[in-house]
Image: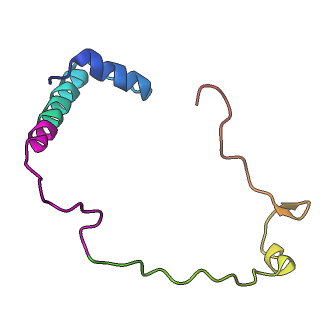
Amino acid sequence: MAISSQEVAHVASLAKLAFAPEELAKFTGQMDAIIKMVEQLQEVDTTGVPVTTHVTDARNIMREDVAVPGTDRDLMMRNVPQQQDGLIKVPAIIDESEEG
């Protein structure tokens, strides 16, 4: 199954990406090569091969989740440059315009 430059352009537009014609041709070739590799992998006989969810025998080594008391609010607020209504005040970082 070959992929067309129109399909690559469509996927790029869905991702809000714009490519020059030469870039589109390059990415179309790369995507086509990737699809051919996946098709080649689908031809491999995996009958009798157990499902692998992890490549190692590692087990969950996370610590037990234990609730502990947090930092005292007054102590924490001593290091805060700005606060409002008992909360830490930080500058806005998300642009809520429709362009973003």
- Judge whether 88 appears above or below 76 on screen: above
Looking at the rendered structure, the number of numbered marks drawn on it comes to: 0
Q: Percent position (x, y) of residue 92?
A: 72, 47
Q: Quadrant of residue 72?
A: bottom right
Query: Taking the image as drawn, is residue 35 in sight?
Result: yes
Colour treatment of the image? rainbow
Query: Taking the image as drawn, is residue 20 in sight?
Result: no
Q: Residue furthest right?
A: 85
Magenta segment: does it hold 52?
yes
Q: Quadrant of the N terminus?
A: top left
> Between 47 and 60, which is closer to the camera in this rendering?
47
Q: Going by the image, does 62 lie left or right of 86?
A: left
Q: Percent position (x, y) of residue 86?
A: 89, 65
Q: Percent position (x, y) of residue 35?
A: 17, 34
Q: Quadrant of residue 95?
A: top right
Q: Percent position (x, y) of residue 12?
A: 36, 25
- Judge whether 36 appears above or below 47 on screen: above
User: Residue drawn at (12%, 59%), measured in percent from left and top?
Assistant: 48
User: Residue drawn at (64%, 26%), measured in percent from left and top?
Assistant: 98
Instruction: Look at the magenta stretch and give its main secondary structure.
Output: loop
Q: Going by the image, does 65 lie left or right of 72?
A: left
Q: Which range is magenta?
A: 37-56
Q: Going by the image, does 86 lie left or right of 71?
A: right
> Between 18 and 82, which is closer to the camera in this rendering?
18
User: Residue drawn at (13%, 41%), measured in percent from left and top?
Assistant: 42
Q: Residue furthest front?
A: 48
User: Residue drawn at (84%, 62%), measured in percent from left and top?
Assistant: 87
Q: Quadrant of the C terminus?
A: top right
